[in-house]
Amino acid sequence: MKTTRSLLVLQIQLKDIEANMEQLLDKVYSTSVAMLLTAVVSVFLFGFHLSLAFFLSSTFTLILFESYKFDSNREYVQRWLADFAGLLTEWIHHLWNASESVLQAAGIELR
């Protein structure tokens, strides 16, 4: 009986690990596609050198698509980007979607 229960617990844990790995692989794939697309556009459209294009694509991708995962509580933004510290948490990682009134309340002017 104890062995059966242990096996069931182990099976449930393995399913959780498998689900987490699938989510991680989906995120890695989508990030890689975005990085590659940005690099290709940089090379062909703007004539950048390939190494510069990959550097720019990785930086651009992290800023646009990954920042909310690594700084969900705004600590980095409040410390290093003080101009954006007054912005509400829900808009901090995509302020270009915020309404004009939200930006004005935070003292931010987009041009």
Image (cartoon, helix red, strand yellow):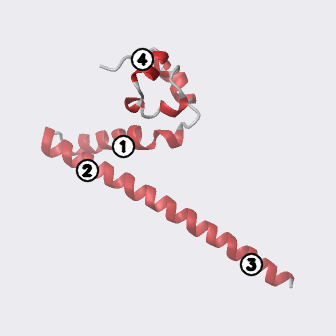
Q: For mark 4, what is the residue?
A: 108
Q: CA distance from mark 1 to mark 3?
A: 41 Å
Q: For mark 3, what is the residue?
A: 8
Q: Secondary structure at mark 2?
A: helix
The tag earlier along the polypeptide, 2 or 4, is: 2
The tag earlier along the polypeptide, 1 or 2, is: 2
Label 4 environment density (alpha carbons within 10 Å; few <14, some 14–19, many ≥20): some
Rendered location of residue 21, percent (x, y)? 53, 64
The tag earlier along the polypeptide, 1 or 3, is: 3
Q: Secondary structure at mark 3?
A: helix
Label 3 environment density (alpha carbons within 10 Å; few <14, some 14–19, many ≥20): few
Q: CA distance from mark 1 to mark 2?
A: 10 Å
Q: Is residue 15 above or below residue 49?
A: below
Residue closest to the eye, 101 or 49: 101
Residue closest to the eye, 98 or 29: 98
Rendered location of residue 43, percent (x, y)? 17, 44
Q: CA distance from mark 2 to mark 4?
A: 30 Å
